[in-house]
Amino acid sequence: MSVDQRLEGILSPFLHYGLYKVRKPEIQLEIGMLITSIDIDVGIEMLGAVNGGKYDENVRGKLFNGPGTECAIGKIEEQALPLIVAFFNELQIPVTFALRGQLFEVDDSILNLIVRSSVEHEIASHSYYHSDFTKLSRNKADNELRLLSEGMRDHRITPKTFIFPRNKVNHLDLLEKYGYKCYRDYGTSHPYFMQDGMYIKKHGRLFDVHPSLYFGSCAHRRNVKLIQKTLDICIEKRLPFHLWFHLWDLGLDSKSIINKIKNVFFPLFSYAKSKAKRGSLSIETMISAVEKMESAKS
């Protein structure tokens, strides 16, 4: 991890806390909301092997680049998913899992693990090949969405949420064409906290369930208390707090993944669960947050 990445992980929760403390709310809900979305960029190591490096460039990230990127990320995600699903099931917390459509060509075990959970998690779309939509022509973007819809329909899933790969937002009208109701807009930028926000805003017929905090960069034990205080602001001002991260942000192997879940995720999400039990916070997926807002207006 670079010096810049370590610095971002330290500063990000402080900057977000300060920002939300003083920023004027754009909306106000009945009670605060916690929304969690998780990007699954590959899913399993086998998908990378099948592609033979063809889409390595599509899924490169801060920790990975070059030949074998898909395989490396897929291997980590294959270890991480059962652990994070078991964790959220134990706390009975629903989250949004964004799956890459090509995964369904190779293996449906990940999908089955999520669908058969004791909690009603949301299955969202994360494109078909994890392509940068700002670099796709309209025809190519349409083809990705068509393949995605057909693949998910074969598994009796009709996704309503779209998570753009690399958070590169484009072709929103095509999302409407394929029946999506919401998406996650681009938040983190330089300075990396200024575009984040606690709001849900409508663009045409689509809802932007806006990102509030990239949890992947600051998921450290030292930051938990401050993120809890930021959640308190969400509760106090009755706003949506949308955490998101990549599945591979959890760690490079099972031991580090388990440690992060135990020392970071459990203190934060059990705190949120306690607030939900008291009635001051609702815990939502992206689509359930939108549906609650729509029903409140009707």
Image (spheres, grey):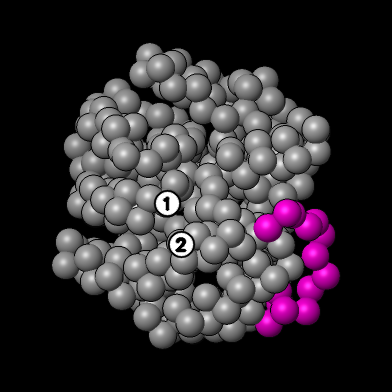
- Residue 284 can be seen in this image: yes
Q: Judging from the image, what secondary structure is the residue with disc 1 in? A: loop
- Cβ atoms under marks 1 and 2 closer than 8 Å: yes
Residue 297: % across, % down: 80, 38
- Residue 196 can be seen in this image: no
Residue 178: % across, % down: 61, 21
**Residue annotated with mark 2:** 273
Q: Is residue 193 magenta?
A: no
Residue 130: % across, % down: 45, 39
Question: Does residue 183 sit above or below 36 in this rendering?
Answer: above
**Residue annotated with mark 1:** 93
Taking depth in this image into account, of 261 and 58 the one nearest to the observer is 261
Q: Main secondary structure of the magenta part?
A: loop
On screen, residue 161 versus residue 69, left or right, reads right
Question: Does residue 19 sit above or below 96 in this rendering?
Answer: below
Residue drawn at (20%, 52%) of the image = 79
Residue drawn at (38%, 73%) of the image = 267
Taking depth in this image into account, of 207 and 281 the one nearest to the observer is 281
Q: Answer few, some or many: residues within 10 Å of disc 2's Cα (few below 14, many 20 plus, some between 14 and 19).
A: some
Q: Answer few, some or many: residues within 10 Å of disc 1's Cα (few below 14, many 20 plus, some between 14 and 19).
A: many
Residue drawn at (40%, 29%) of the image = 101
What range is drawn magenta here?
18-31
The amino acid beneath tag 1 is: Ile
Q: Judging from the image, what secondary structure is the residue with disc 2 in? A: helix
Residue drawn at (58%, 38%) of the image = 287
In the picture, which quadrant includes the C terminus?
Answer: top right
Mark toward the start of the polypeptide (1 vs 2)? 1
